[in-house]
Image (cartoon, rainbow, N blue to C red):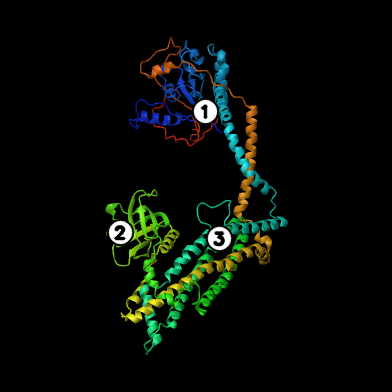
Amino acid sequence: LNLTLIDLPGITKVPVGDQPVDIEQQIRDMIMQFITRESCLILAVTPANTDLANSDALKLAKDVDPQGLRTIGVITKLDLMDEGTDARDVLENKLLPLRRGYIGVVNRSQKDIEGKKDIKAALAAERKFFLSHPSYRHLADSMGTPHLQKALNQQLTNHIRDTLPAFRSKLQSQVLALDKEAEEYRHFRPDDPSRKTKALLQMVQQFAVDFDKRIEGSGDQVDTVELSGGAKINRIFHERFPFELVKMECDDKEMRREISYAIKNIHGIRTGLFTPDMAFEAIVKKQVVKLKEPCIKCIDLVIQELINTVRQCANKLGTFPMLREETERIVTSHIRERESRAKEQVLLLIDVQLAYINTNHEDFIGFANAQQRSSQANKTSSAGNQVIRKGWLTINNISIMKGGAKEYWFVLTAESLSWFKDDEEKEKKYMLPLDNLKVRDVEKGFMSSKHMFAIFNTEQRNVFKDNRFLELACNTQEEVDSWRASLLRAGVYPEKSSVESESSGTAENFSMDPQLERKVETIRNLVDSYMAIVNKCIRDLMPKTIMHLMINNVKEFINAELLAQLYSAGDQNTLMDESQEQVQRRDEVLRTHHALKEALAIIGDISTTTITTPLPPPVDSSWLQAGAGGSRRSPPPSPTAPRRMSAGQRPAGRGAPPPPSRPGPLGPFNNSGDSPQVPNRPNRAPPSIP
């Protein structure tokens, strides 16, 4: 805590030389920047040979400090007063009283400065002046530059003592926060092998715990900002994977065309009387083979999340870079090994489905009921108004004339997609039936941060007012995938790729006789029934297979094998080498902890060895207010004999730039914030008296 002296210029009434015309206002504004701060003590400097009631310094001090709590009057040039006059009434605080009173000083003259009179001699001469002057002799102990310095230092002590309780509490909280860490660092010996072995065991155990919590979830320290690895894998299992399965399904027209070709090719030159089983099996096997791609993609997505989870857990080993790097390498290598094993097993599941078409399955409708399927399907009741999903979406393709892209609250049911003004669902904007709707991807714009998808009508009808499609946007790709999966549950399927659409569109048009059409419809119903069984089985077995062969296996590997792998990987001392950042962190913590302890000890000393002086009682300073009103009020027979009309101000503040080279009696003072910069002193005429 420092006390800083700032020598501010006096008010210039008339511009001199190249000074601007508003020089008075500029100087006044600069002075006010300092003296308006509550942490500033104001030294209102006034020459003894001028009228005190006209002092600009006292006037400005009264404006910002009406109670006089921060103002100290300083009377200079006592040795230059006319003979027979003195400032005794002023210095005794009787004439124009201030709450903190006045202190008289005698500075060096210009002749003394040119004669190289040093500060020590000047202080001695000042002391001699007050002791020898008959009017000031009784005030000598409370006059002079040393007393002014002592008074200011006492104010600094008072300020320090006032701020000590809050400052002590802040330091104590910082010490408590660093105690545990500093204690560990204080007893840490980098070259101790047993210490490194213990740290290695602790790090590996903590890594295993973190990985398990991120996958399985935990009740403590739950992340509320983003999904953990386990939650993301769950979304892959139950949202992304079912969506990828549906994308592999054939279009209805394409399916019927393939079935008709299969029936014709099986009959060959003959005209068949019965629906052939081989056509059914051929179509089913073709559909089952298509399941390989989404299954492999599901494994790849899970692998990526596992590797990301390993990387996040390994980041906590950043204290030891070699250990982090080796741990991440070993676990990632094991995940890649299990990846090939899982893919082999999943492909084996698909091959098992291809090996035998079980038409005796209890959920299979059978040939007898296949022809009744279509008629019954038309009569089945819908799912009603069951709500599938709610959330915010942005409609992008609204014309600029109508406000441009806007966010709405969407509600998806089994029958319709509605959107509202807000989540209170009171003001419905539109309701869109789901009949004949499909979803397609929309490329992200160059300048857009949103992820988009579009809903359109397969019969080329307008979806919303004059728009052929409805372009919707989310903040993340995960939200897009989640909405697409929800639309899938509601029966809104994704659009086929352009290549597939072109290939199906260029297929020859064919006509079917009624008998062939009935056969196609029968096999179509059988394929739908059997593929529903296969999809249900695959959706159930895929998460179980991945959990068994990959996730659970990786957890067991980390708990049982990781430590042994690290020991066999190389020198343990090298693995446990600290990073340079950790070394700097340890030194900084110990240094900060020691400094805080010392600071608390110093505060204790200040509290017991210093004395706070009470604030002086209030005085009647109404004379300043009267002077401010413009009606000049002359004091009773003044001891001063003014020889010129000039006023000076020397307020002392805290927290300003370094003091100027002009000698001063004060030390530095505290500042709790940034202070304004002192502009260059404007040019002015040199005074006739220094």
Q: Is residue 150 left or right of residue 566?
A: left
Residue 579 sits above or below residue 441 on the image: above
In-front residue for pair 509/122? 509
Residue kind at label 2, given as amino acid type: Phe
Residue 420 percent location from the top left of the image: 36, 52
Quarter holding residue 480: bottom left
Instruction: Give amino acid for label 1.
Output: Gly
Q: Which residue is mark 3?
A: 309
Mark 1–mark 2 CB contact (< 8 Å):
no
Using the numbered discs, state the Cα–Cα distance from disc 3 to disc 1 in whole angstroms.
Answer: 65 Å
| Amino acid carrying mark 3 in the image | Thr
Bin the neighbour count of mark 1 within 10 Å (Cα to Cα): few under 14, some 14-19, many 20 and up: some
Residue position for label 1: 664
Image quadrant of residue 495? bottom left
**At numbered mark 1, what does the secondary structure look like: helix, strand or loop?**
loop
- In the picture of the structure, the residue carrying the numbered disc 2 is 464
For discs 2 and 3, the disc positioned in front in the rendered view: 2
Q: Is residue 485 visible?
A: yes
- Measured as percent of width and height from the top left, residue 588 is found at 61, 47
> What residue is shown at x 51% (from left), y 51% (from top)?
224
Label 3: how many residues lie within 10 Å, few (<14), some (14-19) or many (20+)?
Answer: some
